[in-house]
Image (tube, rainbow, N blue to C red):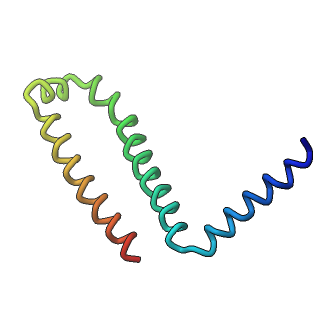
Amino acid sequence: MLAIIPLIAGFFASIVGFIIKHPFVSKMMMFSIFLTVIGLAVSFIKDIVAPYIVNNSFLSMAAYFGVIDGLSLYLTIVLAGFGVKQILAFIRS
């Protein structure tokens, strides 16, 4: 059982060496981390704002008339455009 530990460490060391030597692989890893951070930031902001929207009577009236849905659609388009711009800039670099 103890003989397997150096083999596992060597395996992980070879993977790290492969990632360091190939910039495309490291860029793919950084890209996935980048997308995860953006998704978590949007989710975090949404979680902060949601209780204020639900508890406000004026905003509940706006939600009844569809203003909140319109804002949601607008923000989705803006965030999608920003995301595509950032993805293209990241790939270009």
For the image, the number of numbered tags is 0
Q: Residue furthest right?
A: 2
Give the residue at the far left of this rendering. 65
Residue 81 position (above or below residue 51): below
x and y, in percent, of residue 24 in the image: 49, 71
From the viewer's perspective, tell me whether residue 65 is left or right of residue 79: left
Observer-nearest of 23 and 2 = 2
Q: Is residue 85 positioned above or below 73 on the image? A: below
Point out residue 54 in the picture as x, y percentages from the top left corner.
28, 24
* Up/down of 55 relative to 71, above or below: above
Relative image position of residue 74 (x, y in whole percent): 16, 47
Residue 82 is situated, as x and y percent measured from the top left of the image, at 28, 60
Q: Quadrant of the N terminus?
A: top right
| Rendered residue at 22%/54% (across/down) | 78
Q: Residue at x 37, y 45 (%)?
A: 42
Q: For this rendering, which residue is in front, 93 or 2?
A: 2
Q: Does 87 appear above or below 8?
A: below
- Quarter of the C terminus within the rendering: bottom left
Relative to residue 3, is residue 15 drawn left or right? Answer: left
Residue 62 falls in image quadrant: top left
